[in-house]
Amino acid sequence: MPAAIGTLAWTVALVVLIAMGDGIPDSERWWIGVCLTGIALGVFGFLYIPRLFRDRAGAESGPEASDTAGPATATGTDTAAERP
């Protein structure tokens, strides 16, 4: 949600700057690049954050599942016949 809000804010700022047209002094036109960079980073975050959360959730549940599915000897259920 924060990435979407930030992206929207940068988009509004860009629209305002473009609407000002020639009213922006040449020394201040770099703000257009800042807005475009903010939008690009916001879109990246908007797309990446859900993937990050999904990967973290998978990593948290992954080791627990592999511990329960391990070999029988790893859980201490080996028998005397299996020992050397």
Image (cartoon, grey):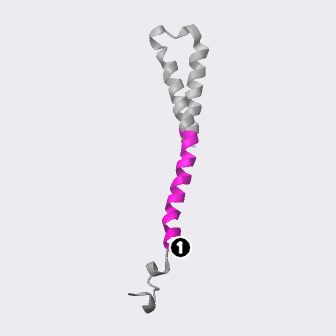
Looking at the picture, tell me which residue is in the foreground, 74 or 43: 74
The image quarter in which residue 19 lies: top right
Residue 47, position as x, y percentages in the image: 58, 41
Q: Give the residue displayed 53% in from the left and 73% down from the top.
A: 69
Q: Residues within 10 Å of mark 1 (few under 14, many from 20)?
A: few
**Which amino acid, mark 1?**
Ala
SS at circle 1: loop
Magenta segment:
45-67
Q: Give the residue displayed 53% in from the left and 58% down from the top.
A: 57
Q: Would you place residue 25 above or below residue 44 in this image? A: above
Q: Quadrant of the C terminus?
A: bottom left
Furthest-bottom residue in view? 80
Residue 58, position as x, y percentages in the image: 54, 58
Looking at the picture, tell me which residue is in the foreground, 53 or 30: 53
Furthest-front residue in view? 84
Q: Give the residue displayed 53% in from the left and 39% down from the top.
A: 45
Looking at the picture, tell me which residue is in the foreground, 68 or 61: 68
Number of disc labels: 1
Q: Give the residue displayed 60% in from the left and 21% down from the top.
A: 15
- Residue carrying label 1: 69
In the image, is residue 62 part of the stretch drawn in magenta?
A: yes
Residue 23, position as x, y percentages in the image: 55, 9
